[in-house]
């Protein structure tokens, strides 16, 4: 696994051994960042369920102003910390090594994000719980884009009741990226 573009291009990143995380492949990561390329430069980027931190680090490499990582697993958080140090992005990043909801509450009033990326464990509906939290949070700007990496059979029928809309769904073989924004006023 490596950073594929930007100031840290080609730098290898550590990964976590075992099946506890699912690193996003370079090909899917490239597709994701091609779709986000206009949004990333100068952005505040939030990487939830961050695993190795590769998505947030890719964002910083491509010009994001700041990235915040949230990872609850101790081994994965240590991996993110090592990757931040190796890429020398320690001044433009912050790691919360805690539960996602504890981290979100701790960030209220400190950050407002342009892009939120989440890759929660599949099948536990954590993306829905995060969307529920974000629906009343001060962490989002009016035009924040939220990207959820989910299994291909995940549904988002609940978004409208939370005042969000599914802007785009990019499906791959076994998973998908859902691009979500706040509903726009009439």
Image (tube, rainbow, N blue to C red):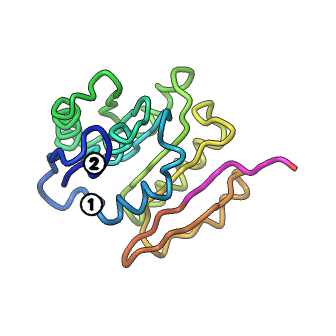
Residue 15 coordinates in the image, percent (x, y): 16, 50
Q: Secondary structure at mark 2?
A: loop
Residue 95 coordinates in the image, percent (x, y): 32, 30
Residue 184 coordinates in the image, percent (x, y): 77, 49
Q: Quadrant of residue 91?
A: top left
Q: Determine the residue positioned at 42% across, 29% down.
A: 66
From the viewer's perspective, tell me whether residue 22 is left or right of residue 86: right
Q: Secondary structure at mark 1?
A: loop
User: Who comes first in sequence, dot 1 or dot 2?
Assistant: 1
What residue is pinned by disc 2?
51
Q: Determine the residue positioned at 58% across, 42% down.
A: 133
**Marks 1 and 2 in Cβ contact (< 8 Å):** yes
Magenta part of the chain: 179-185
Residue 82 coordinates in the image, percent (x, y): 16, 34
Residue reaching furthest right? 186
Q: Determine the residue positioned at 28% across, 47% down.
A: 54
* 103 in relation to 117, above or below: above
What residue is pinned by disc 1?
22
């Amino acid at each position: 696994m490596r950073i594929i573009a930007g100031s840290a291009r080609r730098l290898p990143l550590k990964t976590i051994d075992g099946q506890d995380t699912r690193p996003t492949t370079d090909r899917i990561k490239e597709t994701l960042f091609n779709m986000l390329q206009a949004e990333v430069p100068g952005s505040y980027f939030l990487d939830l369920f961050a695993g190795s931190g590769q998505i947030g680090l890719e964002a910083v490499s491509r010009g994001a102003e700041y990235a915040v990582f949230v990872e609850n697993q101790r081994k994965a958080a240590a991996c993110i910390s090592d990757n931040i140090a190796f890429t020398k992005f320690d001044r433009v990043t912050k790691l919360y090594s805690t539960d996602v909801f504890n981290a979100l509450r701790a960030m209220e009033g400190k950050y407002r994000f342009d892009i939120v990326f989440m890759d929660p464990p599949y099948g536990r509906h954590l993306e829905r719980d995060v969307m529920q939290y974000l629906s009343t949070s001060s962490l989002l700007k009016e035009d924040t884009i939220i990207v959820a990496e989910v299994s291909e059979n995940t549904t988002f029928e609940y978004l409208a009741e939370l005042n969000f809309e599914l802007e785009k769904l990019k499906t791959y073989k076994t998973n998908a990226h859902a691009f979500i924004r706040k509903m726009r006023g009439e």
